[in-house]
Image: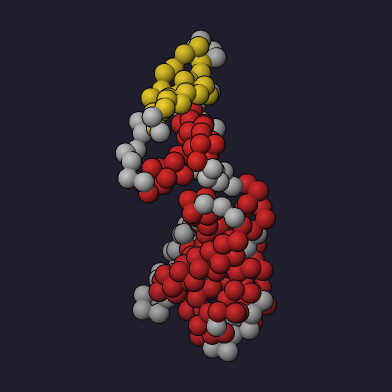
């Protein structure tokens, strides 16, 4: 427990909270970190939301950014860097539980909150999550932003119409959507994905909306 506290950077008044946060259900069915994980997820989302609130963006973009920061794929390397995976108390045959690694971080957040309050939990999260790299690598979900905008104004969602062209060696796709009484068409190397036609078409439609109505999206 002392080594775990040193790695986390926080000394617990109640050592049992730390032990519980590191105990998996495979090791103890009654006293494990599942409830702490549940609570820690909510505390973590609040702290992250508070941290990114002033970044100046839309609700949809902030939601995507928060997801990128609290997703298992983001928390796993943080937990591993802190060494939490090595401190986990597992059942004898529990060796491939990948979910346990990011969940341990959430449980630790809850344990610190319960032991030392919000200020200590906030200090832990802000000192261990890398907000700068997440922001730099974050991809914008233009389809999600367009959907949110249309739903908020009571409009129906668009159909994305795609057509494959080009040669078998060098195919390309033309993707179109009709929104705001206009048709927006783009050309892309794929339909889906971060740089796919659907995302580019949604971005084009949002750009038009921005120019017409002065909204910052």
Q: How is the image coloured?
A: secondary structure
Please determine whether, in this image, residue 215 is positioned above or below residue 199.
below
The residue under the point 60% across, 79% down is: 120
Indicate the quadrant where residue 124 lies: bottom right
What is the residue that sits farthest to the bottom in this orientation?
A: 13
Report x, y in % for residue 198.
46, 31
Indicate the quadrant where residue 177 lies: top left
Q: Of residues 37 and 175, which is closer to you in this image?
A: 175
The reply, left or right, for residue 146 in relation to residue 78 is left
Please determine whether, in this image, residue 31 is positioned above or below residue 137.
below
The residue under the point 32% across, 39% down is: 156
Report x, y in % for residue 150.
38, 42
Report x, y in % for residue 88.
53, 70
Please determine whether, in this image, residue 157 is positioned above or below residue 83.
above
Q: Of residues 92 and 205, which is closer to you in this image?
A: 205
The residue under the point 50% across, 24% down is: 186
Report x, y in % for residue 165.
47, 13
Residue 73 seen by the camera:
no
The quarter of the image holding the N terminus is bottom right
Residue 133 seen by the camera:
yes
> Exactly how many numbered labels are in the figure?
0
Q: Of residues 91 and 178, which is closer to you in this image?
A: 178
Please determine whether, in this image, residue 158 is positioned above or below residue 128.
above
The residue under the point 48% across, 20% down is: 173
What is the residue that sits farthest to the front in this orientation?
A: 213
């Amino acid at each position: 427990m002392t080594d775990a506290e040193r790695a986390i950077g926080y000394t617990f008044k109640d050592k049992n909270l730390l032990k519980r946060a590191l105990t998996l259900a495979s090791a103890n069915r009654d006293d494990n970190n599942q409830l702490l994980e549940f609570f820690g997820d909510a505390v973590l989302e609040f702290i992250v939301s508070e941290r990114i609130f002033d970044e100046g963006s839309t609700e949809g973009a902030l939601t995507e950014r928060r997801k990128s920061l609290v997703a298992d794929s983001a928390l796993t390397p943080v937990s591993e860097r802190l060494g939490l995976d090595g401190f986990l108390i597992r059942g004898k045959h529990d060796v491939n539980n990948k979910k346990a690694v990011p969940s341990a971080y959430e449980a630790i957040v809850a344990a610190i909150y319960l032991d030392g309050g919000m200020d200590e939990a906030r200090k832990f999260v802000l000192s261990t999550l890398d907000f700068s790299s997440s922001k730099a690598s974050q991809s914008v979900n233009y389809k999600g932003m367009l959907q949110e905008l249309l739903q908020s104004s009571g409009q129906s969602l668009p159909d994305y119409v795609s057509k494959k062209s080009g040669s078998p060696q060098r195919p390309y796709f033309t993707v179109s959507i009709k929104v705001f009484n206009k048709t927006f068409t783009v050309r892309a190397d794929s339909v889906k994905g971060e740089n796919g036609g659907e995302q580019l078409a949604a971005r084009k439609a949002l750009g038009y909306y921005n120019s017409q109505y002065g909204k910052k999206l």
